């Protein structure tokens, strides 16, 4: 485990949050990513040197996003990490300029009839 | 709602996109919740219509502890694990539906608050042998004005009731659809979702019109 993510002052670590160095809240932006916020790799952010400094979980998440834009929930399920942990790790990746995160559709914009019709047709065709 | 102030980003649509947030990211994600009492068929329904995966959340008790467990004095980094069902239906590239099966126990209400944020709508699964188990979910979505349909999971050994009887027994607001379904059956599950999306579309459109038109019945 990369020592960078541990801090002597972190206090007792509870297992699920060990990979975040005990942090349970995402970084300085204080964004709490929605479960369906979409995460894409920032094409300009790929920096092999910076990546090599990250922990294996950070790299695993980045790898998952590389194949396809992923929701926060999918990343957690695929990486087999709890959602809270993934949120913290994504905060790091966002801060490092590695990923872009989209907001989910605000509820006020939901009734786009065209989209809902597309969803209904898509469901019928499943 | 409003028990936690660290709401999701979606709660404040007009703030500047934060660093790294790309408004041009054209992909759309829509969220649908599947709720209902213990063992009513939530996992079965999500699995019938989508590729289901378990999703773990570890909630820090400092956020949710008051609501969850009686653990006064425990170190604030203690967490509790909650498992949810999670499935994705890809409509097309860039448009996906995400289904979340909410944990049945009342003590996870705080998770519902997060899940229902920005949700398109919800499916409340009901079992006519213990209809009262879905009361909390019905209450929850009615109070938060989240469009929902009641899907009656027709277990083989349950007496058949008509949609109308169920609607009356649940004292549903007028217009709330009740669908009879078999949660194990893909087509039946699809039909439930279609009814929900249609209904959510009507509800949202009506609200939009309400907000722009003067009320017809105002004197
Ligand atoms: N006969 C019949 N059995 C069903 C039906 N739907 C679900 N079941 C069975 O009922 C049991 C409970 O279903 P689940 O899908 O696990 O229910 P759940 O709501 O996810 O349960 P919890 O997560 O424990 O609250 C399983 O054994 C299912 O196989 C149905 O439509 N008919
Ligand atoms: Mg279940």
Image (spheres, rainbow, N blue to C red):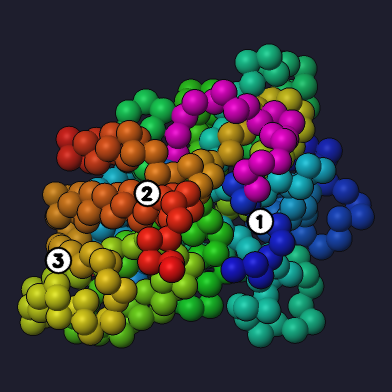
Q: Which mark is residue B180?
A: 3
**Predominant secondary structure, magenta span:** loop
- Is residue B164 found left or right of B26 in the rendered image? left
Of pointers 2 and 1, the one earlier in the residue sequence: 1
Disc 2 or 3, which lies upstream in sequence? 3
Q: Which mark is residue B205?
A: 2
Q: Answer left or right for A41 relative to B26.
A: right
- Position of B157 relative to A97 (above/below): below
Find numbered disc 3 in the image and state the secondary structure of the residue it sits on: strand
Number of marks drawn: 3
Q: CA distance from mark 2 to mark 3?
A: 25 Å
**Residue B133 in view of the camera:** yes
SS for tag 2?
A: helix
Magenta segment: B12-29
Label 1: which residue?
A: B7
Q: Quadrant of residue B138?
A: bottom left
State which chain disc 2 sits on.
Answer: B
Residue at image position (71%, 41%) is: B15
Q: Is mark 3 within 8 Å of ligand 1?
A: no
Q: Are marks 1 and 3 in contact (CB under 8 Å)?
A: no
Host chain of mark 1: B
């Amino acid at each position: 485990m990369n020592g960078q993510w541990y801090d002597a002052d972190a206090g007792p670590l509870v297992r699920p949050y060990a990979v975040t160095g005990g942090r349970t809240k995402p970084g300085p932006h204080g964004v709490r990513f929605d479960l369906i916020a979409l995460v894409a790799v920032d094409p300009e952010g790929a920096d092999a040197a910076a990546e090599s400094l990250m922990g294996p979980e950070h790299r695993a998440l980045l790898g998952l996003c590389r194949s396809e834009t992923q929701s926060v929930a999918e990343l957690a399920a695929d990486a087999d990490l709890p959602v809270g942990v993934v949120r913290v790790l994504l905060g790091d990746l966002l801060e490092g300029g590695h990923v872009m995160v989209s907001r989910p559709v605000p509820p006020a914009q939901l009734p786009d009839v065209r989209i809902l019709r597309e969803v209904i047709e898509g469901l019928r065709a499943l | 709602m409003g028990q936690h102030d660290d709401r999701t980003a979606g709660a404040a649509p007009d703030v500047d996109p934060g660093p790294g947030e790309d408004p041009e990211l054209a992909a759309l994600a829509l969220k649908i919740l599947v709720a209902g009492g213990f063992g009513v068929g939530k996992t079965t329904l999500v699995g019938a219509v989508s590729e289901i995966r378990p999703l773990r959340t570890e909630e820090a008790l400092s956020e949710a502890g008051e609501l969850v467990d009686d653990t006064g004095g425990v170190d604030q980094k203690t967490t509790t694990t909650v498992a949810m069902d999670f499935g994705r239906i890809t409509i097309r590239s860039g448009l996906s539906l995400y289904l979340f099966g909410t944990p049945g126990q009342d003590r996870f209400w705080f998770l519902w608050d997060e899940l229902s944020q920005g949700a398109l709508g919800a499916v409340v699964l009901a079992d006519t042998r213990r209809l009262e188990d879905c009361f909390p979910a019905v209450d929850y979505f009615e109070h938060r004005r989240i469009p929902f349909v009641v899907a009656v999971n027709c277990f083989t050994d349950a007496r058949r009731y008509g949609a109308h009887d169920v609607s009356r027994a649940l004292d549903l607001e007028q217009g709330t659809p009740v669908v009879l379904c078999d949660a194990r059956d893909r087509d039946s599950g699809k039909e439930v979702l279609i009814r929900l999306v249609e209904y959510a579309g009507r509800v949202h459109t009506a609200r939009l019109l309400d907000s722009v038109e003067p009320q017809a019945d105002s004197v």
